[in-house]
Image: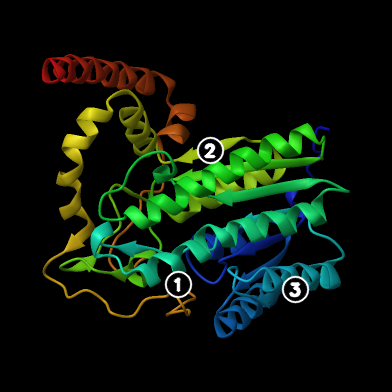
Amino acid sequence: MTPTLKPLAEQVILITGASSGIGLVTARLAAKRGARVVLVSRDGDALVQIVREITEAGGHAEFAIADVGDLRDVQRAASKAVERFGRIDTWVNDAGVAIYGKLLDTPMAEHEQLLRTNYFGAVHGCLTAVEHLQRAGGALITIGSIVSDIPSPGMGAYAASKHAVKGYVDSLRIEINADRLPISVTLIKPAGIDTPIADHAANHLDGAALLPPPVYAPELVAEAILDAAQHRRRDVTVGGTGRLQVLAAQHFPGLLDRLGPTLLPWLRDPKRAPSRHDNLAAPVDNGAERSRDQHGRRISVYETAGRHPLATATAAGAALGLAALAFLGQRRIDQ
């Protein structure tokens, strides 16, 4: 059954991980455009302040304190949304945490906590969302990453969780379609985004954690989410450079294996001490949309392509030429 998705101004949207970063930007933008929003996070203090801000600006918002790693918490958040607004039209799984460090240096307890939030949090959200959306229909949107498709040395635990999320969401989509449920299932795959995720991450590198470049503005992801709330999308990559990275990994995996170690220095600032306060088990310094030190691009290749087709065609031709050179170089290496 084809889902019928409502205009944004008619929707009730529940967003997990809504006290900072992409989730917070999305909640504010959705409320500004007339949606009723339910913000879900572990940080009650931040949620109270954000909901007050939205309502004082004329929006409609509610919050629920929940740890997405606990299915009962997620179910209670959904019940609160229905009690306040009568239904849920779009569910956004955004809650996530990160670990910086080599996999062999990552404590097992941290690895398990990351999976509890990033993978099982998404699973709990999907299960609860389907329960509420299967009758009247709606959109189920989950935030993955370009590292759902490619390796990420120095952030291997995070990449593993996003690979797992992609496998779950893609399989769930097929099952939902087979059961003819009126639910649109979307996976959003951002490149590096200017959010506090690096500031909040557990860090085992020699230096402060940095967002993997190039960094894009969180508004680009928020726009992709709100588009998927209104139009059926399968998956969306945000950030043109990220898409090129995925294509390179698919077509030249051996070359990526060789270049991968050169990416590690881009994940740390050796001039600054690493933070020892992370949000794996408890919220830290929420209420921020962006990172402390890095700034994101406010355009992506895909948006530019729509506005400047001639320039895009020229750039695409150059990219194909570089890809051909890389392919020939890879063949010589393999031979």
Q: Which mark is residue 120?
A: none
In percent of width and height, residue 117 lies at 52, 65
**Nearer the N terminus, badge 2 or badge 3?**
3
Other residues around mark 2 within 10 Å, as few (<14) / some (14–19) / many (≥20)? many
Residue 279 sits above or below residue 305 on the image: below
Q: Nearer the viewer, residue 315 or 320?
A: 320
Q: Report the residue marked by disc 2.
A: 236
Disc 1 is placed on an element classified as loop
Residue 329 sits above or below residue 280 on the image: above
Residue 245, quarter of picture: top left
Which residue does the image show at 49% across and 75% down from the upper left? 287
Q: Quadrant of the C terminus?
A: top left
Which residue does the image show at 74% across and 68% down from the upper left? 75
Q: Nearer the viewer, residue 28 or 44?
A: 44
Q: Nearer the viewer, residue 214 or 148?
A: 148
Q: Is residue 289 visible?
A: no
Q: Which mark is residue 76?
A: 3
